[in-house]
Amino acid sequence: MKGVFLFQIMCALAVIVGWVMNLIAVIHLATADAPLTTMFIVRIIGIPVGLLGAILGWF
């Protein structure tokens, strides 16, 4: 049971870190005057949609 709890904590931490990395990428793209590409728009959508932002943060 302890291993399952540890796995859940690790997954939650990975999601939070991925979302923060996505937020940093969006801020970086916005301040660098990057063109509005499809990936940039999807990253912006990933800020309120946490799971999408968490996945995009790692890539």
Image (cartoon, rainbow, N blue to C red):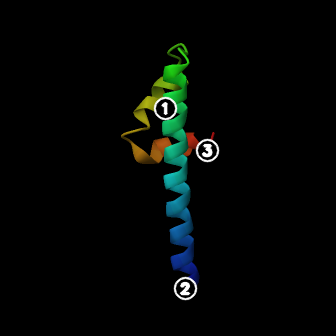
Q: Which residue is mark 3?
A: 58
Q: Is residue 23 above or below residue 17?
A: above
How many marks the image carries: the answer is 3
Classify mark 1: residues with Cα within 10 Å, few (<14), some (14-19) or many (20+).
Answer: many
Residue indicated by mark 1: 43
The relative height of residue 51 versus residue 39 in the rendered view (above or below) is: below
Mark 1: secondary structure: helix
Badge 3 element = loop
Compare marks 2 and 1 and give the one earlier in the sequence.
Answer: 2
Q: Residue at x 54, y 52 (%)?
A: 17
Label 3 is placed on what type of residue? Trp
> What's the distance in space between the residues labelled 3 and 2, CA to CA?
27 Å
- Quarter of the rendering occupied by the C terminus: top right
Horizontal and vertical percent position of residue 51: 45, 48
Residue 13 to residue 17: above or below? below
Q: Position of residue 15 (x, y in %)?
A: 51, 54
Query: Which residue is outermost to the right?
Result: 59
Under mark 2, the amino acid is Lys
Q: Are marks 3 and 2 in contact (CB under 8 Å)?
A: no
In the displayed structure, does residue 47 sit left or right of residue 28?
A: left
Q: Which residue is mark 2?
A: 2
